[in-house]
Amino acid sequence: MIACFCGQPHALGRRFLLASAVAAAALPARAQNVPASAGPADPALIEDLVAGNRILYDQNVVDGFGHISVRHNKDPNRYLLSRSMAPALVTADDIIEYDLDSNPVNANGRSSYLERFIHGEIYKARPDVKAIVHSHSPGILPFADTGVKLRPMNHIASFLGDGAPVFEIRASAGLESDMLIRNAALGKALAVTLGNHPVALMRGHGSVAAAQSIRHVVFRAVYTEVNAKVQAEALKLGKPEYLNAKEAAAATKANDGLVDRPWELWKRRAMAKS
Ligand code: MN
């Protein structure tokens, strides 16, 4: 037992408490900026998120740039997204948790994607959305940049419905922006353009896809790019006959139950290369 001024036998405990109080005094600034974690996510969700990153690279939707996120399974006010890196190299250890203002919960020195606000603001606006892809895939750019509407060429891309809206960043950021969704206001403006659509194009930039799961959003991101290439070819030949609204709705209902089939194929191929 260590003697102390108070003469009580709990001197060591008291010293410990004092030290703890000093440490706690340094905490408030950090506590104010770092939101609480929702806790560990379902490992199966993390596995799908890692696979989604790899698949999107293997299917030519993302390259060194682009990202995919998923809403946290334990808290709808949290989402999961890789640290800032090439998607094809993402592992489970690279996944960071964010709140819907896109503040990292557990960055631990890891850097965040500048455009993470795309994800946070769409999750805020769309409670039905559980996963989001942002990419710069080349096939969609002719449609993002010309005003020619991207519309479904076949039943697989039926989710495009009556066509993908196009986000014009100049309406929010003026004529001198760097085109990036680098803050919450721009993310919110993009979410407004997306509305209830599954896909929005971004003029001079790329696109965003949203869906009810990682597998559905990967399906949509892949077939948005495929559809864009097919539509560009068709437009060289003449005036394409697109799916009408009822065909598109019926086909989407059918496809939504079939996303595991291409997912398993794409996953095996992408993971075998890593
Ligand atoms: Mn981008």
Image (spheres, rainbow, N blue to C red):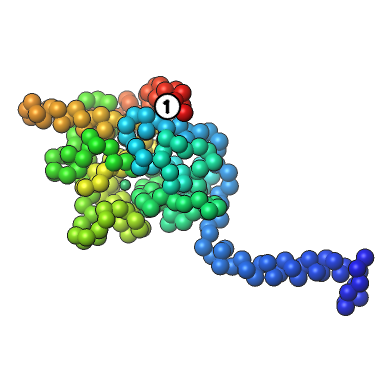
Task: Say which of 191 and 128 sits in front.
Answer: 191
Residue depicted at 44% across the width and 25% down the height: 273
Residue depicted at 13% across the width and 43% down the height: 146
Q: Which of the 4 image quadrants contains residue 17?
A: bottom right
Residue depicted at 29% across the width and 30% down the height: 223
Q: Which of the 4 image quadrants contains residue 23?
A: bottom right
Q: Is residue 176 above or below residue 56?
A: below
Tag count:
1
- Ligand 1 is within 8 Å of the C-beta of the residue at disc 1: no
Residue 254: give x, y in percent of width and height. Answer: 32, 25
Task: Say which of 180 and 143 sits in front.
Answer: 180
Residue 67 visible (yes or no):
yes
Q: Is 188 situated left or right of 26 in this image?
A: left
Residue that label 1 marks = 270
The quadrant of the rendering that contains the N terminus is bottom right
Task: Say which of 199 and 1 sits in front.
Answer: 1
Q: Is residue 146 above or below residue 3?
A: above
Residue 45 visible (yes or no):
no
Residue depicted at 21% across the width and 32% down the height: 228
Q: Residue furthest left?
A: 238
Residue 195: give x, y in percent of width and height. Answer: 28, 47
Residue 201: give x, y in percent of width and height. Answer: 24, 43
Q: Secondary structure at mark 1?
A: helix
Residue 143: give x, y in percent of width and height. Answer: 18, 39
Q: Is residue 37 above or below residue 18?
A: above
Type of the residue with mark 1: Ala
